Every structure is written in structure tokens, then in C-alpha cells.
Image (cartoon, helix red, strand yellow):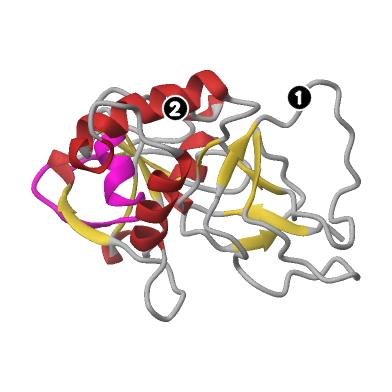
Amino acid sequence: MPRQNRVTPSGDIVATPDRGTFMGNRGCLHDDGGRVRRPWQVRRWLVCVPEFRSRKRQVMRPGYYTELFFLDEATALAAGHRPCAECRRDRFDAFRRAWRTVHPQLGGPRLPTADVIDRRLHAERVGPDRSKRCFTAGLGDLPDGVFVRHPAWGDAAHLVRGDWLLPWSAGGYTGRLARPADLEVAVLTPESTVGVIRAGYAPDVHPSASEPAGPAR
């Protein structure tokens, strides 16, 4: 049976045999039997590389952080994570530079700290009932690399990419829909992260995003 450690764009943690291209964590979420008992423990939600300095880990080791996996970085950002300052330092600094453009009042002339970013992201990704927080925007106003959903698509998560919307699945993107510019959608990616992407931070996406995996509709 696959472990429950794969994250969707909505931030849910699910069990699937499909492998992701990025790892991350939100603290220790599992019990001694490897069962996930809570959606998050700490405010520091990270996106990490799967391999770093030849470190070896026992997945879901009792008492240690829960290793989470993502299809790609765009998925992790939509779920509310941000680049790790250790294993992805260059990307973290690029994220901080773009963040400063979006929120100059939060850090002054210096690059924002991880704590400043994490406090703001936590308020934008988690609602009062601990559910996923979204916001509404016009589809034509959103940059490539964010995730959206709409009842017309069965409420499934779709990646915005050029003139298309790409339906997400745990194994990759499974087709494409024409992108209507005038549609109001629920945006899964936190609002500040959308601003960071608009300011020039380009999330890494799964190779299937570049493949026409099915007819356009």
C-alpha cells in the first residue's frame, strides 16, 4: 500500500503510488505507525529537492518530520509551501526578491526573512476552520504557474499555462482546456505567491505540462 504522503494543489495529503519530483514538509504529521494524524504542525511549509548532500532518511520515522511529495513545484506552491532556504537556497533567495516587490512594507529594503514569509503565507493558505483558503480572480489576470478551479470543470485543480488550463493528476497533467480570459475562478495558489510568480519567479513544472496529452477542448 502506498504511504499517505503525496500533496495535491489543494494541500490535501493523499496516498498514491505515483512519485513526485519535489519533497517537502510541514513538521511531524504522522504517528508511530506511519498514519497521518494532522494536516500541519508548524508554519514553515517547505519545498525541497529529493536528494541533498547524500543524506539518507527513513520515511515517516517516528518523531521526525513527515516527508511530503509533490508532482512539481507549482503544485507545492499552490498547496502553500515555499522554497527551502537550505537545499534550494538560490530559489529561496529568488522567491524573497520577488516577495520584496510584492510586499515592500513587510521587510523594508532588506530581503524578507523566512519568518516574515511564513507568517503571511500561513494566514493566506489556512482558514479559521483549518481548511484551504482560496481567493477569487479573473482567469485572464493570472500568471502562468498558478492553480485554479471552477465548478464547470468538476472543481478539479487546473494549472494556468499560456493559452491553456492543464488538469492536474498525481501522475502528471492529463490534457488541456482552452483558457477563457473572462472567467472568474477560485485561485488555489496563495495570493502573495501569485504576486511572487507575477513578479518573475517561475515555478518548476512537471514535464507532462509541455506535452499535448489529449485533445484540446
Residue 4 x, y percent position in the rendering: 74, 61
Per the rendered image, the range of residues in magenta is 178-197
- The image shows residue 88, relative to residue 2, as above or below, that is above
Residue 207 x, y percent position in the rendering: 55, 24
Task: Give SS at disc 1.
Answer: loop
Q: Is residue 217 visible to the viewer in this orientation of the structure? A: no
Seen as rendered, the residue at the extreme left is 182
Q: Amino acid at mark 1?
A: Phe
Left or right of 193: which side holds 204?
right
Task: Pick whichever, 36 or 207, lies toward us.
Answer: 36
Residue 187 falls within the magenta-colored stretch: yes
- Choose top left, top right, bottom left or bottom right for residue 16: bottom right
Task: Pick whichever, 128 or 168, lies toward us.
Answer: 128
Left or right of 8: which side holds 144?
left
Structural crowding at the residue carrying mark 2, measured as other residues with C-alpha within 10 Å and reported as few (<14), some (14–19) or many (≥20): few
Residue at image x 89%, y 62%?
A: 62
Task: Pick whichever, 119 or 205, lies toward us.
Answer: 119
Structural crowding at the residue carrying mark 1, measured as other residues with C-alpha within 10 Å and reported as few (<14), some (14–19) or many (≥20): few
Q: Amino acid at mark 2?
A: Pro
Q: Is residue 34 visible to the viewer in this orientation of the structure? A: yes
Residue 177 x, y percent position in the rendering: 31, 42
Task: Pick whichever, 84 or 77, lies toward us.
Answer: 84
Residue corresponding to mark 1: 52
Residue at image x 37%, y 64%?
A: 155
Residue 188 x, y percent position in the rendering: 35, 55
- The image shows residue 131, relative to residue 216, as above or below, that is below
- Mark 1, mark 2: which one is toward the viewer? 1
Residue at image x 29%, y 66%?
A: 151
Residue corresponding to mark 2: 212
Residue 53 falls within the magenta-colored stretch: no
Where is the C terminus found, in terms of image quarters?
top left
